[in-house]
Structure formats: C-alpha cells, structure tokens
Image: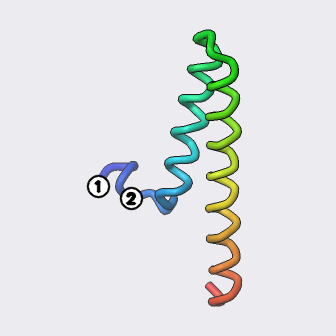
C-alpha cells in the first residue's frame, strides 16, 4: 500500500495542503493577490479540518 493511500489525513487536510501549495506557486509566479488568497484559504481549510477532527475525537473518546 502506498504512503498516499495509507495516510490518516482527511480530504480537507489534503485539499488545504494543495491550495496552500498552489497559492505559494501563484505568489512566486507574479500573482500576489491570488497567491495570498489561495495560501490563506489553504491554511484555513487545513486548520478547520484538523480542529474538527480533534473535536470529534475528543467527544467520542478516541
């Protein structure tokens, strides 16, 4: 089984990483506004998903 399919990260965390990466690439490519927006959106998506997973684990006792 590959590392990508065996990871325990949720889809929201993966999308957050993806948007942050695309944001950095756009920022370095010359589109600072779009790059900054995508970067901040990616971080927000990642942290929101991580916080939701933590809260669900805390509530269910896992």
Q: Position of residue 28 (x, y in %)?
A: 63, 14
Residue beneath label 2, please?
6
Q: Position of residue 12 (x, y in %)?
A: 53, 56
Q: Position of residue 6 (x, y in %)?
A: 39, 58
Which residue is the extreme one toward the left?
A: 1
Residue 40 falls left or right of residue 14: right
Give the image quarter of residue 60: bottom right
- Alpha carbons under labels 2 and 1: distance apart: 7 Å
Is 20 situated above or below 57? above
Which residue is the extreme one toward the top?
A: 30
Secondary structure of residue under mark 2: loop
Quarter of the image containing the C terminus? bottom right
Mark closer to the chain start, 2 or 1: 1
Callout 1: 10 Å neighbours few (<14), some, many (20+)?
Answer: few
Residue 7 falls left or right of residue 23: left
Disc 2 + disc 1, Cβ < 8 Å: yes
Residue beneath label 1, please?
1
Which residue is the extreme one toward the front?
A: 33
Task: Please give the name of the residue rendered at 56% of the width and 53% of the height, measured from the top-left corner.
Answer: 13
What coloring was used for the rendering?
rainbow
Give 37 or 49, whichever is nearer the viewer.
37
Task: Please give the name of the residue rendered at 70% of the width and 82% of the height, measured from the top-left corner.
Answer: 58
Quarter of the image containing the N terminus? bottom left
Task: Please give the name of the residue rendered at 63% of the width and 52% of the height, measured from the top-left corner.
Answer: 46
Callout 2: 10 Å neighbours few (<14), some, many (20+)?
Answer: few
Secondary structure of residue under mark 1: loop
Task: Please give the name of the residue rendered at 68% of the width and 18% of the height, measured from the top-left corner.
Answer: 32
Give 40 or 4, whichever is nearer the viewer.
40
Residue 1 falls left or right of residue 55: left
Q: Position of residue 14 (x, y in %)?
A: 50, 49
Give 61 or 38, whichever is nearer the viewer.
38
């Amino acid at each position: 089984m590959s590392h990508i399919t065996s990871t325990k990260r949720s889809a929201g965390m993966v999308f957050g990483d993806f948007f942050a990466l695309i944001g950095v690439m756009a920022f370095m490519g010359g589109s600072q506004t779009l790059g900054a927006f995508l970067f901040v959106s990616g971080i927000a998506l990642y942290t929101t998903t991580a916080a939701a997973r933590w809260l669900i684990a805390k509530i269910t006792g896992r």
